[in-house]
């Protein structure tokens, strides 16, 4: 037996207890991540018995964050990020200021100095991307408009926190910290030099990834895929995720998570991006569990009994203050109440960046042990309750809409994009095709219809897509296509065909029922997820229900038969 098996013992204890506690949590109808957090508490230094290696656990957790953010990047293209920039950038910045103010004022009320109150408020202002992704994936919201807005919002928060982490040492002495800026004799010059250098590094990293990474990483996947070796392909994916993240941190002082996220975004343009996501999924899940275990290891259960009032205030800021601030901001941007609630629930927790910022604050003398304990306790409680808050959003929305006309109006905003403009020719709204959904499939269909000069109207929930279509003088309405008002605005009553690009059978049924109620003769076309669902749809609703695999096989066969030797 080797003398040092701390890595093996940490992995064995972490995975085993996470499985046990996660299983118990699932049986109690709690999120499994609550069990993972409790597993970390059990093997942490604050509880009796076995104590895992804290240093190794934090590094393993960092790998999990890298792989998870890499997977997000594989599904979240630059176009997706830019599509939500109008709400994500100003919304995230204002929300950080509001949350920081709430946390800072609370700490000032407790008698904390200005520097500690500021760092404490910043720690409460940034949510955990890892927790958000788990919540969105569990509810199938990752690819939705609401999911893209929430992810884009948190990406902007992460970028702001990267800037804060680099600039905080320069401000340490001004805020009463124990570490002075590098150039104490000329603090103003040193401060502006640090700011300029930080911005230059971030800009250089983004430029490098957009210019070099966007070309090199997809090509690298293609070269490795040509070998036909599955294990080599998986190794290439993991090496890209971890390697780019490490290089970004060392060369540009960018966080590991952000570096991995951009690596995934650049690789998203490859035709093998979906395979890369599938190959890295098992490792992403395994190391994500270690992230939650490592968070639990930092928590001291005795602190809950020592400062219950302060902990309640921190949890209130995270769960209530941040949520209400985010909901108000999203509503100000004229998004529906459902979107506002989703984004609000997404931000009602704190995580990895809060821990990193708290550690930097302690090293600079800007945060005490009490402040760090409050942040860790607040993170543990908010992460544990976040899934329940997510689950309560839809019942809360339904309850508000059933009892408040104002809530009904907020969920169905008086939005100019929700109605066809008056400039649309009325003659083009008879026997037209209604295209429900303007995703990648919808865009190809629209291009084909335009090439054949067929009249069509697009209905999509993405405001930026609708605005872009209207700029091209294509009739389009914004809203949830399962809402009767949206199909009414698309003039489904006079349409000849309804094409549904969504493969979710429940949503297909909702749209089909609405369309047939408003227009019994409309022709329905949709592509279901599998043959069984297509058969069920055909039994219940008169329409043409295609299967993705079958449609692809028929297209390939047609090409093959039409090709002359």
Image: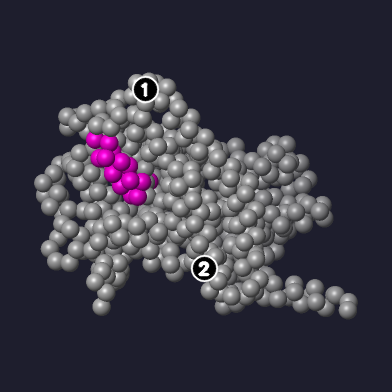
Residue 320 at x, y percent in the picture: 30, 42
Could one spot residue 420 in this view of the protein? no
Left or right: residue 444 versus residue 97 is: right
Left or right: residue 35 versus residue 62 is: left
Secondary structure under tag 2 reads helix
Q: Taking 326 as reference, is 196 above or below it? A: above
Q: Which residue is mark 1?
A: 187
Taking the magenta stretch, the answer to whether it contains residue 192 is no
Q: Earlier in the sequence, mark 2 or mark 1?
A: 1
- How many neighbours does mark 1 have within 10 angstroms: few (below 14), some (14-19), or many (20 or more)? some
Q: Which residue is mark 2?
A: 235
**Residue 199 circle label:** none
Could one spot residue 51 in this view of the protein? yes
Report the front residue among 516 and 122.
Answer: 122
Mark nearer the viewer, 2 or 1 = 1
Q: Quadrant of the N terminus?
A: bottom left
Q: Are marks 2 and 1 in contact (CB under 8 Å)?
A: no
Residue 274 at x, y percent in the picture: 57, 64
The CA span between labels 2 and 1 is 47 Å
Secondary structure under tag 1 reads helix
Q: Quadrant of the C terminus?
A: bottom right
Q: Which stretch is magenta?
A: 347-365
Can you name the residue that lies furthest to the left here?
306
Residue 552 at x, y percent in the picture: 69, 72
- Residue at image position (23%, 54%) is 298
Report the front residue among 8 and 526.
Answer: 8
Left or right: residue 373 versus residue 190 is: left
- Residue at image position (63%, 55%) is 216
Where, by quadrant of the figure, is residue 526 drawn? bottom right
Q: Taking 181 as reference, is 367 above or below it? A: below
- Residue at image position (15%, 57%) is 46
Taking the magenta stretch, the answer to whether it contains residue 353 is yes
């Amino acid at each position: 037996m080797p003398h040092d098996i701390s890595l093996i013992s940490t992995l064995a204890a972490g995975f085993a207890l996470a499985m046990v506690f996660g299983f118990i949590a699932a049986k109690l109808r709690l999120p499994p991540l609550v069990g993972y957090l409790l597993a970390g508490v059990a093997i942490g230094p604050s509880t009796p018995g076995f104590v895992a290696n804290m240093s190794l656990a934090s590094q393993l957790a960092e790998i999990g964050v890298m792989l998870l953010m890499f997977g997000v990047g594989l599904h979240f293209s630059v176009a997706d990020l830019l599509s939500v920039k109008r709400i994500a950038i100003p919304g995230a910045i204002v929300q950080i200021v509001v949350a920081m103010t709430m946390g800072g004022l609370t700490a000032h009320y407790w008698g904390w100095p200005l520097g500690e109150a500021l760092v404490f408020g910043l720690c409460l202002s940034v949510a955990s991307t890892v927790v958000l992704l788990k919540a969105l994936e569990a509810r199938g919201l990752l690819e939705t408009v609401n999911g893209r807005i929430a992810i884009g919002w948190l990406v902007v928060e992460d970028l702001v926190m990267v800037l804060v982490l680099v600039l905080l040492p320069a401000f340490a002495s001004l805020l009463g910290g124990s570490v002075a800026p590098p150039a104490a004799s000329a603090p103003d010059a040193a401060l502006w030099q640090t700011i300029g250098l930080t911005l230059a590094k971030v800009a250089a990293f983004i430029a490098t990834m957009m210019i070099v990474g966007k070309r090199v990483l997809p090509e690298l996947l293609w070269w490795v895929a040509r070998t036909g070796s599955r294990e080599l392909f998986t190794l290439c994916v993991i090496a890209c995720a971890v390697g780019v993240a490490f290089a970004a941190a060392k060369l540009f002082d960018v966080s590991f998570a952000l570096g991995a996220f951009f690596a995934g975004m650049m690789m998203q343009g490859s035709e093998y991006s979906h395979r890369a996501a599938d190959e890295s999924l098992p490792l992403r899940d395994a190391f994500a569990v270690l992230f939650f275990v490592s968070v639990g290891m930092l928590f001291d259960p005795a602190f809950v009994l020592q400062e219950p009032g302060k902990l309640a205030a921190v949890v209130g800021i995270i769960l209530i203050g941040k949520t209400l601030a985010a909901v108000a901001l999203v509503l100000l941007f004229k998004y529906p109440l459902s979107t506002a609630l989703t984004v609000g629930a997404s931000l009602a927790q704190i995580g990895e960046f809060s821990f990193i910022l708290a550690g930097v604050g302690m090293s600079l003398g800007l945060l005490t042990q009490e402040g760090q304990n409050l942040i860790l306790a607040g993170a543990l409680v908010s992460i544990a309750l976040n899934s329940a808050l997510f689950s309560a959003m839809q019942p809360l929305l339904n309850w508000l809409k059933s009892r408040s006309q104002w809530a009904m109006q907020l969920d169905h905003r008086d939005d100019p994009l929700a109605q066809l403009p008056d400039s649309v020719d009325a003659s083009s709204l008879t026997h037209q095709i209604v295209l429900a959904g303007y995703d990648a499939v919808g865009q190809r269909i629209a291009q084909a219809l335009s090439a054949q000069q067929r009249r069509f109207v697009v209905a999509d929930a993405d405001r930026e897509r609708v605005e872009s279509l209207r700029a091209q003088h294509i009739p389009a309405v914004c809203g949830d296509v399962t809402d009767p008002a949206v199909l009414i605005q698309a003039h489904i009553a006079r349409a000849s065909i309804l094409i549904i690009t969504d493969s979710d059978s429940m949503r297909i049924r909702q749209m089909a029922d609405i369309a047939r109620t408003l227009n019994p003769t409309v022709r329905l076309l949709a592509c279901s997820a599998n043959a069984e669902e297509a058969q069920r749809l055909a039994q219940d609703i008169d329409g043409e229900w295609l299967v993705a695999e079958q449609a692809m096989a028929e297209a390939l066969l047609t090409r093959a038969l039409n090709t002359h030797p």
